[in-house]
């Protein structure tokens, strides 16, 4: 029995150790990816700032190359952000993302080539190749801009359609609420009329029942003299026959006779 317990305890211990190692590896990997992402963003920001400074502060070939790289990187980054954010709401943009990834290959190739040309000392040859470089950059940026604006227009169209449908549903609901309010008022008025009729009906039913009983006893309707005589007889009987004394409660004392002193 004891060896089995020891083996079981060791298995549980190893399981916890393995789980701890797995969680640690995942945490380290996530932290490393976060650090790499932060470093990449910082490097990209520094590089964009440098390109912006060169395009504004330097002229000639160096300024032209910096301007081409800045325009290319800005267009590609904006399109990537628009597509990857839009696909979370519209799954049909996955095909557009596939096209953009193929376009990104050409964009990275051109950006790397422009980056190498910035270090090339042969400025005359670079100046001769600038028209071709501008044409390639314009082709890539136009394609990226087309994808980005198409995705944004699609998102705006979906939002406008959804707003139109929602407005129609709200209008229908508003009409239904107004109709319900009028029906409630009508029901309340009908209920009040029914209550008034119910309050008035008991006295009429009592009168009718009294008249019906007299008619059945005499074979004809009661006359006013008979009613008066009956009322006087009832009053005299009540005066001659006083009511029985009230039943005493257990906790009350017994009454003493009046003659007792």
Image (cartoon, helix red, strand yellow):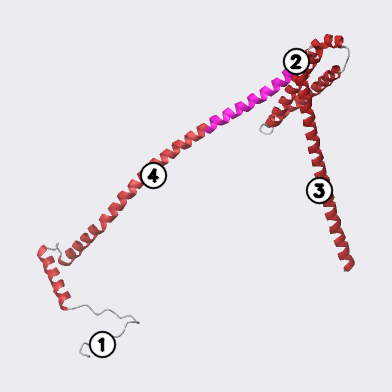
Q: Earlier in the sequence, mark 1 or mark 2?
A: 2
Q: Of discs 1 and 4, which sits in the foreground?
A: 1
Quadrant in the rendering for residue 60: top right
Crowding at dot 3, Cα within 10 Å, few <14 / some 14-19 / many 20+, comes out as: few
Q: In whole angstroms, how far apart are the C-alphas of marks 1 and 4?
A: 66 Å
- Seen from the viewer's position, the closer of residues 222 and 30 is 30
Residue 152: say if magenta.
Answer: yes
Residue under numbered circle 3: 23
Residue under numbered circle 4: 184
Magenta portion: prevailing SS class: helix
Residue 256 is tagged as 1
Crowding at dot 4, Cα within 10 Å, few <14 / some 14-19 / many 20+, comes out as: few
| Quarter in which the C terminus is drawn | bottom left
User: Where in the figure is residue 74, as x and y percent of width and height?
Assistant: 73, 23
User: Where in the figure is residue 183, as x and y percent of width and height?
Assistant: 39, 42
The kind of secondary structure element at disc 3 is helix
Q: In whole angstroms, how far apart are the C-alphas of marks 4 and 2?
A: 68 Å
Which residue is rendered at x = 78% and y = 23% of the image?
A: 50
Q: Earlier in the sequence, mark 1 or mark 3?
A: 3
Q: Earlier in the sequence, mark 4 or mark 2?
A: 2
Q: Are marks 1 and 2 in contact (CB under 8 Å)?
A: no
Whether residue 179 is visible: yes
Q: Are marks 1 and 3 in contact (CB under 8 Å)?
A: no
Q: Of discs 4 and 3, which sits in the foreground?
A: 3
Q: In whole angstroms, how far apart are the C-alphas of marks 4 and 3?
A: 62 Å
Residue under numbered circle 2: 138
Q: What stretch of residues is rendered in magenta?
A: 140-166
Which residue is rendered at x = 42% and y = 41% of the image?
A: 180
Quadrant in the rendering for residue 56: top right
Q: In whole angstroms, how far apart are the C-alphas of marks 2 and 3?
A: 48 Å
The kind of secondary structure element at disc 1 is loop
């Amino acid at each position: 029995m004891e060896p089995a317990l020891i083996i079981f305890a060791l298995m549980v211990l190893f399981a916890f150790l393995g789980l701890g190692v797995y969680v640690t590896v995942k945490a380290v990997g996530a932290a490393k990816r976060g650090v790499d992402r932060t470093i990449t963003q910082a490097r990209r920001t520094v590089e964009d700032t440098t390109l912006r400074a060169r395009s504004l502060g330097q002229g000639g070939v160096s300024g032209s190359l910096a301007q081409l790289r800045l325009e290319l990187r800005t267009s590609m980054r904006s399109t990537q952000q628009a597509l990857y954010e839009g696909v979370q709401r519209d799954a049909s943009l996955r095909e557009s993302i596939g096209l953009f990834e193929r376009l990104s290959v050409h964009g990275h190739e051109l950006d790397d080539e422009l980056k190498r040309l910035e270090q090339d000392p042969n400025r005359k040859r670079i100046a001769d190749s600038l028209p071709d470089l501008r044409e390639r950059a314009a082709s890539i940026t136009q394609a990226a801009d087309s994808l980005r604006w198409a995705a944004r227009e699609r998102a705006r169209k979906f939002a406008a359609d959804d707003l139109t449908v929602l407005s129609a549903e709200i209008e229908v609901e508003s009409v239904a609420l107004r109709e319900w309010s009028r029906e409630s008022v009508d029901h309340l008025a009908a209920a009040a009329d029914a209550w008034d009729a119910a309050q008035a009906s008991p006295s009429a039913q009592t009168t009718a029942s009294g008249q019906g009983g007299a008619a059945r006893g005499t074979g004809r309707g009661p006359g006013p003299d008979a009613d008066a005589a009956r009322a006087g007889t009832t009053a005299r009987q009540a005066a001659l026959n006083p009511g029985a004394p009230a039943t005493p409660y257990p906790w009350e004392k017994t009454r003493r006779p009046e003659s007792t002193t």
